[in-house]
Structure formats: structure tokens, C-alpha cells
Amino acid sequence: MFNLEQIILAVPAILLAISFHELGHGYVAYKLGDPTPKYQGRLTLNPLAHLDPMGTIMLILFRVGWARPVMINTQYFKNKRQGTLLVSLAGPLANVLLGWIFYNGLKIANLHLPYSSFSSTLLMFLLINVQINLGLAAFNLIPIPPLDGSHILASVLPPRLAYNYARLAPYGPIVLIVLLISGGARFFINPIYNVLSTLLIRLSL
């Protein structure tokens, strides 16, 4: 169980991770020609524009959760399937990038900072940022609607299979709730998290 210090350090890390994730979605959609994220004020790192209360609580307590989704209009994309794929990938990749930055900061700080209560707290803060960003990316890559992984999968499936898969969307939130409550979500999250961790370590400075 997390102690009070870890929870306090996790709050700014969560706000940054959520904001960066949703900005990633919105920015890529905007660059692909969709003005919707800009009109809705989602091209910002201001966490107030992105917070989902329940998703934030889940992140604080369990290191997995979600933000308020960025709305997009695929009619603006020249290629709808490709555009949806890129926008869906952008959020998790933004978190992997942020996790990579904090991981390298953690390595540098661990090597060069003398031991003190301040350095210990700083190292914990950097580690929490790595964990939260990879956890948020891994959770969102689960291919269950409405998570990013479901949109990614639908974008690469043949059209007929994608259509049949999309029909399962109404049941996705129920499945996710059951998985989160039962702990079954870890069977999906852990393998993805491990792959992302290995990638992050191999690409570190």
C-alpha cells in the first residue's frame, strides 16, 4: 500500500501524465486537419481541461486510470483509418516519451546526487513519474473499448472484422469495470507494461 508521501508525490505526476496523454491525442488530430480539439480547449497541458474524477482517483490508488477523452471528428481526416490509428497511438506514445525523460532523469540523479532526504524524495518522485506514465500507457493500450488499444486494433483489422469488433463497444466499459474490480486487468496491463519498460530501458541514454 502507498504511504502518504507517495500519494502526495503522485498527484502532480498524474496531472502531468494525463495532460500530456490527452494533448498527444489532440495535437495529432489537429495536425491531421481536425479543429475539434482546439475548439474544445484540449490543446493544452492545463490538467483542468483533461481530468476525469474517477479516472484520476484510480490513477492515485492503483497507478492505472484514464482522463476525459479528446473528442475527434474523423471526417476531417484524409484517411479515416490511418488518422484514427495515429491519433489513438499518440496518447500512449506521449506517455512513453514522458516516462523515458523521467527515467533518464532518474538515472542521472541516482548517479550524481549525494544521499540526503531531498535526493531520496526526488528519486522517488522521478520513479513515480516513470511508473505512472508507463502504467497509463499500458492501461490505455488494452484492446477493450473505449480505450486507445481498441481504436488501434480496429484501425488495423480488415474492414469486416473491424465492423464486428466495433459492435462490442457498448459492452467495453462493463468489461473494464469487472476487470478493474476483480484485479483481472493486471493480466493485460502487466505484459504491456513489461514490454514498454524493456523498450524504455533499451532506448535510455
Image (cartoon, rainbow, N blue to C red):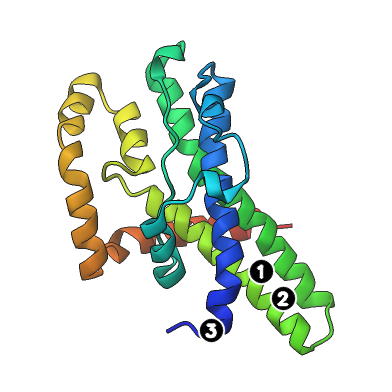
Q: Earlier in the sequence, mark 3 or mark 1?
A: 3
To which residue does mark 3 refer?
4
SS assignment at label 2 = helix
Q: On residue 122, which mark appears?
A: 2
Of badges 3 and 2, nearer the viewer stands 3
Question: Residue at image x 16%, y 37%?
Answer: 168
Question: Residue at image x 75%, y 88%?
Answer: 117
Tag 3: Cα neighbours inside 10 Å, few (<14), some, or many (≥20)?
Answer: few
Residue 40: percent from left, percent from top: 51, 30
Q: Disc 1, disc 2: CB below 8 Å?
A: yes
* Residue 197 at least partly seen: no
- Quadrant of residue 69 in the image? top left
Query: Which quarter of the image is occupied by the N terminus?
Result: bottom left
Amino acid under label 1? Leu
Q: On residue 67, which mark appears?
A: none
Q: Disc 3, disc 1: CB below 8 Å?
A: no
Residue 87: percent from left, percent from top: 47, 31
To which residue does mark 1 refer?
126
